[in-house]
């Protein structure tokens, strides 16, 4: 009758060899798993709030990336904050801030940050007189707290720097604040930080930001 294999009956040297072999197999499996996970991570598209650059223009050449300008000259007093709420002196409460506030005198000119088409001109119930521009590539800029008389209408095509209107005091939500432009940028419908797309040169020239 054939004798069954019993690990317990094996010499100490054999047990050590078996243990080392199992350890090596386990370590090898772990390394393979880590390498595979790292490769999968590298294949995932990176998170990016920067508007895409369209390729394949005329003649098969890539189009130049859009340079976004500051919409007004002034000081950024309230920054974009989708996570941490900021205090509203007018409402006396803490709220998220989906854009930036650019402090500038009432009557200061407000201009388009890039070429595009005016899609909306309306009075927002909280932000006051508002103009929205579609710049393509799923990018929309929003200019609020404008004076009631604006320089554009829905359907107008604008160039970078086209005058849209002037800063007013039409925002019910921010009446207690100093005169300013409330400015938002939306990418694929979601509000993003406008300072993230405005060119460094324009931020330095218009906001004094280094």
Image (cartoon, grey):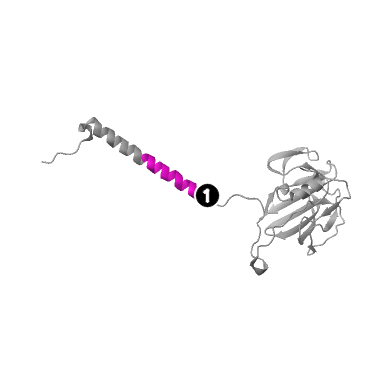
Point out the stretch of residues depicted in magenta. 26-41
Residue 54 is one of the magenta-drawn residues:
no
Mark 1 is surrounded, within 10 Å at the Cα level, by few (under 14), some (14 to 19) or many (20 or more) other residues, namely: few
- On the picture, is 174 further left or further right than 135? right
> Against 33, is 165 above or below?
below
Residue 138: x and y in percent read 67, 58
Q: Is residue 126 visible?
A: no
Residue under the image location 31 percent in, 36 percent down: 20
In this view, 79 is above or below 154: above
Residue extending furthest bottom? Answer: 59
Residue 11 sits in which quadrant?
A: top left
Q: Residue shown at 70%/53% (left/top)?
A: 186
Majority secondary structure in the magenta region: helix
Residue assigned mark 1: 42
Query: Going by the picture, which residue comes out furthest to the left?
Result: 1
**SS under mark 1:** helix
């Amino acid at each position: 009758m054939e004798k069954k294999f019993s690990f317990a009956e094996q010499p100490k040297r054999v047990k050590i060899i078996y243990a080392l072999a199992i350890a090596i197999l386990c370590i090898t499996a772990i390394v393979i798993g880590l390498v595979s996970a790292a490769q999968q991570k590298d294949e995932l598209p990176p998170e990016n709030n920067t508007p895409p650059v369209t390729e394949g223009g005329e003649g098969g050449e890539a189009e130049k990336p859009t340079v976004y300008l500051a919409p007004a000259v002034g000081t950024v007093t309230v920054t974009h904050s989708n996570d941490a709420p900021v205090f509203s002196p007018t409402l006396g409460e803490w709220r998220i801030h989906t854009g930036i506030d650019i402090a500038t005198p009432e009557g200061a000119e407000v201009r388009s940050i890039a070429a595009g088409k005016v899609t909306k001109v309306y009075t927002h119930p909280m932000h006051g007189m508002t103009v929205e521009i579609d710049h393509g590539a799923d990018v929309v800029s929003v200019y609020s707290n404008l004076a009631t008389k604006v320089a554009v209408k829905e359907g107008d095509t604008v160039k970078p720097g086209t005058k849209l209107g002037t800063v007013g005091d039409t925002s019910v939500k921010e009446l207690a604040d100093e005169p300013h432009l409330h400015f938002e940028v939306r990418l694929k419908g979601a509000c993003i930080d406008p300072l993230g797309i405005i060119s460094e040169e324009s931020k330095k020239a218009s906001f004094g930001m280094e």
